[in-house]
Image (tube, helix red, strand yellow):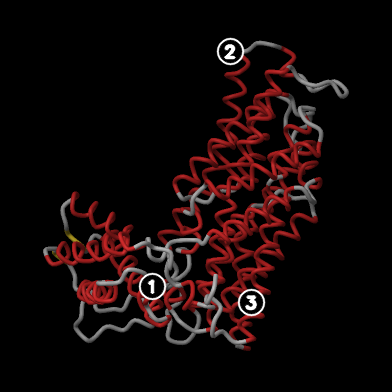
């Protein structure tokens, strides 16, 4: 990390330390807010005592952060307007960072205090969208423009469908289990402190571990994305690009930019768009977006050619390289989705692959970022978990959770969250698992407590708009003072 913090002011350093502490606090709260769902089933089925369950979950969360990759982290970052991702300046970066952190922390702590299993995913994504919308209200912008609505709709759809999927599939899985494993003891609530049969205990411990691991790989990535936004926003020269890239990867990026330019020269553009993609990137009069992309590709190639390490670039050159790559990727993505870029199916697939090759320069996370997120999430799991556990274990259904219900809910949650992490889609552990428990209660015929479900639904409905409102107002307020 030598030299990464060189040249930053005392104010920026203080802002950086404060931001990182708050980000770790967000993941800490996320640990006991969301992971409580994973341990509720093993605790209430008497499979494990509370502390062994919580410690096991914390360990699995820790390793989930490391093994889960950074696809979800990049999805979180890409929700922001391209303008904020490429604008160099402390005021915009600091306002973005503090608004994000404060809005997410305030809502998460409020819902935790009330014992409501609200979604940290909804909170963070709402905060990011709120900043994008607030940024579009500033002079020189058009309301709503700049927000990555395609990515937002993709993420929003996954957040909407996943709890419905959890409710339905968990209920169906329980009904299937009754036919395949007609052991009446599995569908009765535990008696006293008696433990379930060994094989059921093994399944429940495995699914608890799986949900916790999946939570780390999905929600942990959100923390990684958050910290990368902090680092890029406050000290862009040191974290704008992946300085650990080897010479071979740099050469691949040079070849990718060259191949992209060749493909685009043969492309047919149905409509020459002269409107800039972002407010700060104004092309020359009569210059199409495709021509701007070709110029950016030529600049990327000239910067990278002959380089054995990105550390050879000045901090300003690193930032310019980041800006060029993001503008290339965002513009081509927009043109592909609008249908204005006409290429064969095979060529479009190659363009997408080459864009991914270039994004390896900007889409990364240092090892130390993964470590602090993993530690924060893992330690947070072991503290403050009781409020949410009681809600999930006692207040969703009208009867006590049975062994089969716990297993069905966690199998569905584990698989849903794990697949979503691999696909780079942030989903809510809270909503998937709590809706899975509700689904098993309905399938069991025991019914659900309408008052609790109404509170959870209200938190679900309000989380996105309230976090958007909080972060948007905070962003505009902070911009006034920076």
Q: Earlier in the sequence, mark 1 or mark 3?
A: 1
User: In the image as oriented, which residue stretches furthest toward the left?
Assistant: 266
Circle 2 — which element?
Answer: helix
Task: Point out the frontmost of discs 1 and 3.
Answer: 1
What's the distance in space between the residues labelled 2 and 1, CA to CA? 55 Å
Q: Residues within 10 Å of mark 2 (few under 14, many from 20)?
A: few
- Residue at 61%, 69% (x, y): give it: 100
Disc 2 target residue:
180
Q: Earlier in the sequence, mark 2 or mark 1?
A: 2
Disc 3 target residue:
474
Q: Quadrant of the C terminus?
A: bottom right
Q: Nearer the viewer, residue 256 or 212?
A: 256
Locate residue 111, reporting x and y percent.
74, 56
Q: Residues within 10 Å of mark 3 (few under 14, many from 20)?
A: many
Check whether the beta carbons of the residues at disc 1 and disc 3 lie within 8 A of each other.
no
Locate residue 462, reporting x and y percent.
65, 58
Locate residue 14, reporting x and y percent.
66, 80
Locate residue 83, reporting x and y percent.
42, 76
- Residue at 43%, 59% (x, y): give it: 151
Is 97 placed above or below 9 here?
above
Q: Residues within 10 Å of mark 1 (few under 14, many from 20)?
A: many
Disc 1 target residue:
322
Q: Earlier in the sequence, mark 2 or mark 3?
A: 2
Check whether the beta carbons of the residues at disc 2 and disc 1 lie within 8 A of each other.
no
Circle 1 — which element?
Answer: helix
What's the distance in space between the residues labelled 1 and 3, CA to CA? 27 Å
What's the distance in space between the residues labelled 2 and 3, CA to CA? 54 Å
């Amino acid at each position: 990390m030598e030299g990464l913090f060189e040249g930053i002011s005392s104010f920026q350093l203080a802002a950086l330390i404060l931001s990182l502490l708050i980000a770790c606090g967000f993941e800490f709260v996320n640990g006991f807010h969301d992971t409580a769902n994973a341990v509720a089933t093993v605790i209430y089925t008497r499979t494990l005592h509370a502390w062994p369950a919580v410690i096991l979950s914390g360990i699995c969360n820790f390793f989930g952060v490391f093994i889960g990759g950074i696809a979800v982290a990049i999805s979180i970052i890409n929700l922001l307007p391209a303008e904020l991702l490429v604008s160099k300046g402390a005021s915009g970066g600091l306002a973005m960072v503090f608004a994000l952190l404060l809005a997410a922390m305030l809502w998460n702590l409020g819902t935790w205090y009330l014992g409501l299993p609200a979604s940290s995913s909804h909170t963070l994504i709402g905060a990011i969208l709120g900043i994008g919308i607030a940024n579009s209200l500033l002079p020189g912008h058009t309301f709503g423009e700049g927000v990555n609505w395609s990515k937002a709709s993709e993420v929003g759809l996954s957040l909407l469908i996943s709890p419905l999927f959890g409710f339905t599939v968990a209920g169906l899985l329980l009904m299937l289990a009754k036919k395949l494993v007609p052991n009446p003891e599995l569908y009765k609530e535990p008696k006293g402190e008696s433990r379930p049969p060994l094989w059921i205990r093994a399944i429940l411990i495995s699914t608890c571990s799986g949900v916790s691991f999946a939570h780390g790989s999905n929600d942990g990535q959100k923390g990684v994305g958050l910290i990368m936004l902090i680092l890029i926003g406050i000290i862009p020269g040191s974290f704008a690009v992946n300085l650990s890239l080897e010479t071979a990867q740099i050469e691949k990026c040079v070849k990718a930019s060259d191949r992209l330019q060749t493909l685009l020269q043969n492309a047919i553009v149905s409509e020459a768009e002269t409107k800039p993609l972002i407010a700060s990137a104004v092309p020359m009069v009569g210059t199409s977006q495709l021509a701007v992309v070709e110029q950016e590709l030529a600049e990327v190639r000239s910067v990278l050619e002959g380089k054995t390490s990105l550390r050879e670039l000045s901090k300003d050159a690193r930032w310019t390289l980041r800006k060029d790559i993001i503008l290339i990727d965002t513009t081509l993505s927009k043109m592909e989705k609008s249908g204005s870029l006409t290429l064969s199916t095979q060529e479009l697939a190659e363009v997408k692959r080459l864009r991914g090759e270039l994004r390896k320069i900007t889409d990364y996370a240092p090892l130390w970022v993964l470590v602090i997120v993993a530690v924060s999430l893992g330690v947070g799991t072991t503290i403050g978990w009781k409020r949410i556990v009681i809600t999930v274990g006692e207040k969703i259904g009208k009867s006590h959770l049975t062994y089969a219900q716990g297993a069905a809910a966690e199998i569905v949650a584990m698989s849903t969250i794990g697949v979503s992490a691999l696909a780079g889609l942030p989903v809510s552990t809270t909503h998937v698992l709590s809706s899975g428990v509700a689904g098993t209660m309905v399938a069991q015929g025991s019914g659900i407590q309408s008052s609790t479900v109404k509170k959870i639904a209200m938190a679900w409905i309000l989380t996105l708009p309230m976090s958007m409102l909080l972060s948007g107002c905070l962003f505009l307020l902070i911009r006034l003072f920076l």
